[in-house]
Image (tube, rainbow, N blue to C red):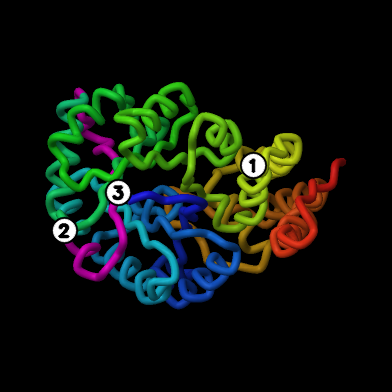
Amino acid sequence: MRIQGLIAATFSSFHADGSPDLTRIPSLVDQLIADGVKGVFICGTNGEGPNLTIEERMQIAEAYVKAVNKRCLVLVHVGHPAIAEARKLAEHAQRIGADAISAVAAFYFKPSSAQNLTDCMAQIASAAPEMPFYYYHIPAITGVAMDLLEFLQLAEKAIPNLAGIKYTASTLHEYQSCVQYGNGKFDILFGYDELLLPALAVGAKGAIGSTYTFAAPLYRKVIESFEAGDIQAAQQWQYEAVRMIRCLGRYSPIPTQKAILKILGTDLGPCRLPLAQLSPQQAEDIRLYLEEIRFAETLRAAGASLQGSVASGHHSPHKS
């Protein structure tokens, strides 16, 4: 399996009482497809997968597969501290017709070595042997930071359906080594939105990220400019993305991004504890910052440029 372009790591959608709101998924999917994403990554970090029961995760996966209706890829995160539960989610994803599965390392009792990690992932992947499997590397959250080249060496033998890695770390030298491993044998999807341009420079072809859920046109311009050899334009579009991302650390990043979605017109409801919804004052602070950097205008300019790029060439974003 080879993925080129952007995969949106989608956010949870909840009712006010905290129950999953599946009715919001079809319109979100339509918007993402219109924005040019190549797929959705569901029930991961941003989808609050660890905050959901496996029954809820199955319901959400079914809703996405139905809403997508083969118009883009559906990658289902099946990771769980209990391998038996992860296997249930993997088998379910295969049965409902998703396109790929992915799993983080267990984050309570953590794998102790690359071999131990491989053994865990092999058990999960074998529950859906017909599906491409991606190991989800996110050491800042899981605390699991193995040598991924050693993991690939072990996993390519132990996991027949290993497609690659969802690589969510800033260690670009290791990322590049994984991309090059085995003459590019595996699909190494990059997961740090703020470093998309440098990742492209070391060989990234596909990326999975949270801000692609509401800012995909911006990043598509980064990719388009890079591929056209217009590095200055790629740098400027990436900088516009970085300016937006800088506000995500003011408060909790996931509730902040859901607040940005709401500001842009997509209300996915609150988060689940321990993630707390932004207060009205905090949400207003984010709104004012986005207004200050003219984020909405930049996003529209990116979309318009993508529509007109074939006829009129490439455009740089405004500089301010």
Which residue lies under the disc numbered 2?
88
What x and y, as percent, mark residue 314? 76, 51
Q: CA distance from mark 1 to mark 2?
A: 35 Å
Q: Is residue 247 visible?
A: no
Pointer 3 and pointer 1: residues touching (CB < 8 Å)?
no
Q: Give 60 or 118, whichever is nearer the viewer.
A: 118
Name which residue lies at 16% across and 44% down: 160
Query: Where does residue 18 sit, x and y in percent of width and height?
Result: 42, 65
- The residue nearer to you, when weighing 222 against 278, is 222
The quadrant holding residue 312 is bottom right
Q: Bounds of the magenta span? A: 91-113
Residue on which disc 1 sits: 245
Q: Residues within 10 Å of mark 3 (few under 14, many from 20)?
A: many
Q: Closer to the camera: disc 3 or disc 1?
A: 3
- Secondary structure of residue under mark 2: helix
Which amino acid type is shown beneath numbered disc 2? Lys
Q: Indicate the amino acid at tag 1.
A: Ile
Q: Is residue 297 above or below residue 203?
A: below
Was residue 194 drawn as part of the magenta stretch in this picture?
A: no
* Label 1 vs 2, first from the N-terminus: 2
- Residue 56 in view of the camera: yes
Q: Quadrant of residue 136?
A: top left
- Relative to 63, does residue 172 appear above or below in the rendering? above
Per the image, is 97 magenta? yes
- How far is disc 2 from disc 3 in space, using C-alphas? 13 Å
Q: Position of residue 33 (x, y in %)?
A: 53, 67
Q: Position of 225 compared to 100: left or right?
A: right
Mark-to-mark CA distance, 3 and 1: 25 Å
- Judged from the image, the secondary structure of the residue bearing numbered disc 1 is helix
Q: Mark 3 highlights which residue?
A: 102
* Dot 2 or dot 3, earlier in sequence: 2
